[in-house]
Image: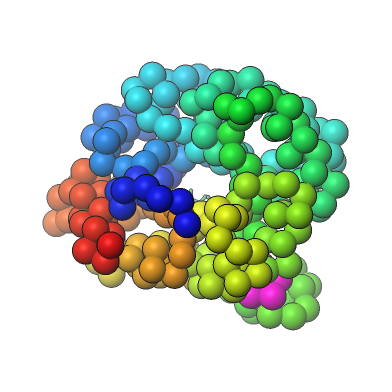
Amino acid sequence: MVAVAPHERILVALDVADLASALALVEQLRGQVGGFKVGMELCTAMGVPQVVQAVAAQGGAVFLDLKFCDIPNTVAGAVRSACALGPAVRMLTLHCHGGAAMLRAAAEAARAAGPQRPLLLGVTVMTSLDAAALHAELGVAGSLAEHVVHLAQMAQACGLDGVVASPHEIAAIREACGPDLLIVTPGVRPVWASSGDQRRVMTPAEAVAAGSDYLVIGRPITAAPAEVGGPHEAALRIAAELQARN
Ligand SMILES: O=C(O)c1cc(=O)[nH]c(=O)n1[C@@H]1O[C@H](COP(=O)(O)O)[C@@H](O)[C@H]1O
Protein backbone atom coordinates (compact mmCIF):
# COMPACT_ATOMS: atom_id res chain seq x y z
CA MET A 1 0.00 0.00 0.00
CA VAL A 2 1.19 3.55 -0.69
CA ALA A 3 2.23 5.47 2.43
CA VAL A 4 0.07 8.61 2.52
CA ALA A 5 -1.88 10.45 5.21
CA PRO A 6 -5.36 8.99 5.79
CA HIS A 7 -7.22 11.92 4.19
CA GLU A 8 -5.02 11.71 1.09
CA ARG A 9 -6.51 8.31 0.32
CA ILE A 10 -9.82 10.03 -0.48
CA LEU A 11 -10.37 10.89 -4.15
CA VAL A 12 -13.61 12.79 -4.67
CA ALA A 13 -15.63 11.97 -7.80
CA LEU A 14 -16.79 15.25 -9.33
CA ASP A 15 -19.81 13.77 -11.12
CA VAL A 16 -21.46 17.09 -11.95
CA ALA A 17 -22.38 18.60 -15.30
CA ASP A 18 -20.79 22.05 -15.12
CA LEU A 19 -17.44 23.49 -14.21
CA ALA A 20 -18.78 25.98 -11.67
CA SER A 21 -20.29 23.18 -9.56
CA ALA A 22 -17.08 21.16 -9.84
CA LEU A 23 -14.87 24.07 -8.84
CA ALA A 24 -17.16 24.93 -5.91
CA LEU A 25 -16.54 21.40 -4.59
CA VAL A 26 -12.77 21.69 -5.18
CA GLU A 27 -12.78 24.97 -3.29
CA GLN A 28 -14.59 23.39 -0.30
CA LEU A 29 -12.55 20.18 -0.24
CA ARG A 30 -9.02 21.19 -1.30
CA GLY A 31 -6.52 20.14 1.35
CA GLN A 32 -9.06 17.80 3.02
CA VAL A 33 -8.72 15.04 0.38
CA GLY A 34 -6.05 13.57 -1.88
CA GLY A 35 -7.50 14.62 -5.23
CA PHE A 36 -10.43 14.88 -7.58
CA LYS A 37 -11.75 12.43 -10.13
CA VAL A 38 -13.12 14.04 -13.27
CA GLY A 39 -15.00 11.79 -15.64
CA MET A 40 -17.48 11.39 -18.42
CA GLU A 41 -20.26 13.67 -17.22
CA LEU A 42 -18.14 16.75 -16.53
CA CYS A 43 -15.66 16.23 -19.37
CA THR A 44 -18.36 15.58 -21.97
CA ALA A 45 -20.11 18.77 -20.96
CA MET A 46 -17.10 21.04 -20.52
CA GLY A 47 -14.16 19.55 -22.45
CA VAL A 48 -11.27 17.55 -21.02
CA PRO A 49 -8.44 20.16 -21.26
CA GLN A 50 -10.61 22.90 -19.78
CA VAL A 51 -11.71 20.71 -16.87
CA VAL A 52 -8.19 19.45 -16.11
CA GLN A 53 -6.68 22.93 -16.26
CA ALA A 54 -9.39 24.48 -14.10
CA VAL A 55 -9.20 21.83 -11.35
CA ALA A 56 -5.40 21.91 -11.41
CA ALA A 57 -5.38 25.73 -11.26
CA GLN A 58 -7.34 25.48 -8.00
CA GLY A 59 -4.67 23.19 -6.59
CA GLY A 60 -6.46 19.88 -7.07
CA ALA A 61 -4.66 16.70 -8.18
CA VAL A 62 -6.59 15.26 -11.13
CA PHE A 63 -7.65 11.66 -11.64
CA LEU A 64 -8.84 11.56 -15.27
CA ASP A 65 -11.45 8.81 -15.48
CA LEU A 66 -12.39 8.40 -19.13
CA LYS A 67 -12.17 4.58 -19.10
CA PHE A 68 -10.56 4.20 -22.51
CA CYS A 69 -11.58 1.02 -24.31
CA ASP A 70 -10.86 0.68 -28.05
CA ILE A 71 -8.33 -0.86 -30.43
CA PRO A 72 -4.69 -0.54 -29.26
CA ASN A 73 -3.72 2.19 -31.75
CA THR A 74 -6.65 4.39 -30.78
CA VAL A 75 -6.11 3.95 -27.04
CA ALA A 76 -2.36 4.64 -27.36
CA GLY A 77 -3.24 7.92 -29.08
CA ALA A 78 -5.75 8.80 -26.37
CA VAL A 79 -3.15 8.08 -23.67
CA ARG A 80 -0.65 10.34 -25.48
CA SER A 81 -3.28 13.09 -25.56
CA ALA A 82 -3.95 12.64 -21.84
CA CYS A 83 -0.21 12.75 -21.06
CA ALA A 84 0.08 15.97 -23.08
CA LEU A 85 -2.31 17.62 -20.60
CA GLY A 86 0.66 17.76 -18.24
CA PRO A 87 1.61 16.61 -14.74
CA ALA A 88 -1.71 17.72 -13.20
CA VAL A 89 -3.15 14.43 -14.49
CA ARG A 90 -1.93 11.95 -11.86
CA MET A 91 -4.11 8.95 -12.78
CA LEU A 92 -5.87 7.74 -15.91
CA THR A 93 -8.31 4.84 -16.39
CA LEU A 94 -8.67 2.16 -19.09
CA HIS A 95 -11.03 -0.81 -19.24
CA CYS A 96 -9.20 -4.10 -18.70
CA HIS A 97 -11.82 -5.68 -20.98
CA GLY A 98 -10.08 -3.93 -23.90
CA GLY A 99 -7.58 -6.80 -23.72
CA ALA A 100 -3.85 -7.28 -23.25
CA ALA A 101 -2.67 -5.71 -26.52
CA MET A 102 -4.65 -2.56 -25.73
CA LEU A 103 -3.27 -2.36 -22.18
CA ARG A 104 0.31 -2.88 -23.40
CA ALA A 105 -0.09 -0.17 -26.04
CA ALA A 106 -1.42 2.18 -23.37
CA ALA A 107 1.46 1.41 -20.99
CA GLU A 108 4.04 1.97 -23.77
CA ALA A 109 2.45 5.29 -24.73
CA ALA A 110 2.46 6.45 -21.11
CA ARG A 111 6.07 5.40 -20.50
CA ALA A 112 7.15 7.32 -23.61
CA ALA A 113 5.72 10.47 -21.99
CA GLY A 114 8.44 10.41 -19.33
CA PRO A 115 8.63 10.29 -15.55
CA GLN A 116 5.80 12.77 -14.93
CA ARG A 117 3.30 10.58 -16.74
CA PRO A 118 -0.02 9.70 -15.10
CA LEU A 119 -0.42 6.35 -13.33
CA LEU A 120 -2.47 3.97 -15.48
CA LEU A 121 -5.32 2.11 -13.77
CA GLY A 122 -7.23 -0.80 -15.30
CA VAL A 123 -10.92 -0.93 -14.47
CA THR A 124 -11.88 -4.53 -13.65
CA VAL A 125 -15.57 -5.31 -12.92
CA MET A 126 -17.77 -2.31 -12.24
CA THR A 127 -18.93 -2.01 -8.63
CA SER A 128 -22.51 -1.60 -9.86
CA LEU A 129 -22.48 -5.21 -11.09
CA ASP A 130 -23.01 -8.23 -8.89
CA ALA A 131 -22.18 -11.87 -9.62
CA ALA A 132 -25.62 -12.53 -11.11
CA ALA A 133 -25.22 -9.71 -13.64
CA LEU A 134 -21.67 -10.79 -14.49
CA HIS A 135 -22.88 -14.30 -15.31
CA ALA A 136 -26.30 -13.64 -16.86
CA GLU A 137 -25.67 -10.34 -18.66
CA LEU A 138 -21.99 -10.46 -19.55
CA GLY A 139 -21.75 -14.25 -19.92
CA VAL A 140 -18.70 -14.59 -17.68
CA ALA A 141 -18.26 -18.06 -16.17
CA GLY A 142 -16.49 -18.53 -12.85
CA SER A 143 -16.71 -16.41 -9.75
CA LEU A 144 -16.65 -12.64 -9.73
CA ALA A 145 -13.48 -12.59 -7.60
CA GLU A 146 -11.72 -14.98 -10.00
CA HIS A 147 -12.61 -12.76 -12.94
CA VAL A 148 -11.40 -9.62 -11.17
CA VAL A 149 -8.12 -11.30 -10.21
CA HIS A 150 -7.67 -12.53 -13.79
CA LEU A 151 -8.09 -8.98 -15.10
CA ALA A 152 -5.80 -7.52 -12.41
CA GLN A 153 -3.03 -10.02 -13.22
CA MET A 154 -3.35 -9.19 -16.91
CA ALA A 155 -3.20 -5.46 -16.17
CA GLN A 156 -0.08 -5.95 -14.05
CA ALA A 157 1.62 -8.14 -16.66
CA CYS A 158 0.88 -5.50 -19.33
CA GLY A 159 2.65 -2.78 -17.33
CA LEU A 160 -0.24 -0.91 -15.72
CA ASP A 161 0.33 0.72 -12.33
CA GLY A 162 -2.89 -0.37 -10.69
CA VAL A 163 -6.50 -1.42 -10.92
CA VAL A 164 -9.92 -0.13 -10.02
CA ALA A 165 -11.98 -2.74 -8.19
CA SER A 166 -14.58 -3.21 -5.50
CA PRO A 167 -13.27 -3.36 -1.91
CA HIS A 168 -14.62 -6.92 -1.78
CA GLU A 169 -11.90 -8.09 -4.18
CA ILE A 170 -8.93 -6.32 -2.54
CA ALA A 171 -7.72 -9.33 -0.55
CA ALA A 172 -7.81 -11.64 -3.56
CA ILE A 173 -6.00 -9.08 -5.76
CA ARG A 174 -3.30 -8.47 -3.13
CA GLU A 175 -2.73 -12.20 -2.75
CA ALA A 176 -2.41 -12.68 -6.50
CA CYS A 177 -0.58 -9.46 -7.46
CA GLY A 178 1.46 -8.54 -4.37
CA PRO A 179 1.87 -5.25 -2.52
CA ASP A 180 3.05 -3.01 -5.38
CA LEU A 181 -0.02 -2.95 -7.61
CA LEU A 182 -2.13 0.10 -6.73
CA ILE A 183 -5.70 -0.75 -5.78
CA VAL A 184 -8.23 2.05 -6.15
CA THR A 185 -11.70 1.30 -4.83
CA PRO A 186 -15.03 2.95 -5.60
CA GLY A 187 -18.11 1.34 -4.06
CA VAL A 188 -17.22 2.96 -0.74
CA ARG A 189 -20.00 3.96 1.60
CA PRO A 190 -19.79 5.32 5.16
CA VAL A 191 -22.48 3.74 7.35
CA TRP A 192 -24.31 7.07 7.33
CA ALA A 193 -24.62 7.25 3.50
CA SER A 194 -26.97 5.47 1.11
CA SER A 195 -25.63 2.82 -1.31
CA GLY A 196 -27.49 4.20 -4.34
CA ASP A 197 -26.67 2.15 -7.45
CA GLN A 198 -23.53 0.58 -5.93
CA ARG A 199 -23.82 -3.17 -5.29
CA ARG A 200 -20.48 -4.27 -3.78
CA VAL A 201 -19.73 -1.74 -1.05
CA MET A 202 -17.65 -1.38 2.14
CA THR A 203 -17.09 1.49 4.54
CA PRO A 204 -13.98 3.66 3.98
CA ALA A 205 -12.23 2.25 7.06
CA GLU A 206 -13.03 -1.35 6.05
CA ALA A 207 -11.71 -0.74 2.53
CA VAL A 208 -8.40 0.71 3.78
CA ALA A 209 -8.08 -2.08 6.35
CA ALA A 210 -8.52 -4.55 3.49
CA GLY A 211 -5.63 -2.91 1.62
CA SER A 212 -7.10 -0.21 -0.61
CA ASP A 213 -4.61 2.52 -1.57
CA TYR A 214 -7.17 5.08 -2.66
CA LEU A 215 -10.93 5.39 -2.16
CA VAL A 216 -13.07 6.95 -4.88
CA ILE A 217 -16.01 8.60 -3.15
CA GLY A 218 -18.64 10.66 -4.89
CA ARG A 219 -22.16 11.21 -3.63
CA PRO A 220 -21.53 10.53 0.09
CA ILE A 221 -19.36 13.68 -0.05
CA THR A 222 -20.60 15.74 -3.01
CA ALA A 223 -24.30 15.24 -2.21
CA ALA A 224 -23.94 15.07 1.57
CA PRO A 225 -27.20 16.23 3.11
CA ALA A 226 -27.51 19.13 5.54
CA GLU A 227 -27.73 16.79 8.55
CA VAL A 228 -24.23 15.53 7.71
CA GLY A 229 -23.07 19.14 7.29
CA GLY A 230 -22.48 19.22 3.53
CA PRO A 231 -19.43 18.12 1.49
CA HIS A 232 -16.74 19.64 3.69
CA GLU A 233 -18.05 18.02 6.88
CA ALA A 234 -18.64 14.70 5.12
CA ALA A 235 -15.00 14.62 3.92
CA LEU A 236 -13.74 15.50 7.40
CA ARG A 237 -15.88 12.77 8.90
CA ILE A 238 -14.56 10.15 6.51
CA ALA A 239 -10.96 11.30 7.09
CA ALA A 240 -11.56 11.02 10.87
CA GLU A 241 -12.91 7.48 10.42
CA LEU A 242 -9.75 6.59 8.47
CA GLN A 243 -7.52 8.27 11.06
CA ALA A 244 -9.23 6.35 13.87
CA ARG A 245 -8.28 3.01 12.35
CA ASN A 246 -4.74 4.16 11.45
O1 LIG B 1 -13.76 3.83 -12.50
C1 LIG B 1 -14.41 4.27 -11.55
O2 LIG B 1 -14.05 5.28 -10.97
C2 LIG B 1 -15.54 3.47 -11.07
C3 LIG B 1 -15.47 2.11 -11.26
C4 LIG B 1 -16.44 1.27 -10.67
O3 LIG B 1 -16.38 0.05 -10.79
N1 LIG B 1 -17.42 1.83 -9.95
C5 LIG B 1 -17.54 3.19 -9.77
O4 LIG B 1 -18.47 3.64 -9.08
N2 LIG B 1 -16.62 4.02 -10.37
C6 LIG B 1 -16.75 5.49 -10.23
O5 LIG B 1 -16.65 5.86 -8.85
C7 LIG B 1 -17.54 6.92 -8.56
C8 LIG B 1 -18.44 6.47 -7.44
O6 LIG B 1 -19.33 7.49 -7.11
P1 LIG B 1 -20.34 7.34 -5.89
O7 LIG B 1 -21.12 6.07 -6.11
O8 LIG B 1 -21.19 8.58 -5.98
O9 LIG B 1 -19.48 7.28 -4.64
C9 LIG B 1 -18.27 7.28 -9.85
O10 LIG B 1 -17.62 8.39 -10.42
C10 LIG B 1 -18.06 6.07 -10.74
O11 LIG B 1 -17.91 6.44 -12.10
Residue at screen point 42% across, 32% down: 61
Dividing the picture into quarters, in which one does residue 8 lie? Answer: top left
Residue at screen point 35% across, 25% down: 59
Establish if 197 lies above or below 63.
below
The residue nearer to you, when weighing 73 against 214, is: 214
Which quarter of the rendered picture does the C terminus lie within?
bottom left
Dividing the picture into quarters, in which one does residue 15 lie? Answer: top left
Dividing the picture into quarters, in which one does residue 97 lie? Answer: bottom right
Establish if 142 lies above or below 2.
below
Residue 236 at x, y percent in the picture: 21, 50
Q: Is residue 134 visible?
A: no
* Left or right side of 202 for 49: right
The residue nearer to you, when weighing 73 against 41, is: 73
Q: Is residue 102 visible?
A: yes
The residue nearer to you, when weighing 69 against 114, is: 114
Residue 154 at x, y percent in the picture: 76, 58
What is the span of residues highlighted in magenta in the rendered image? 144-148
* Left or right side of 110 for 32: left
Whether residue 45 is in magenta: the answer is: no
Residue 118 at x, y percent in the picture: 58, 34
The residue nearer to you, when weighing 84 against 197, is: 84
Establish if 147 lies above or below 162.
below
* Left or right side of 81 for 33: left
Residue 99 at x, y percent in the picture: 81, 53
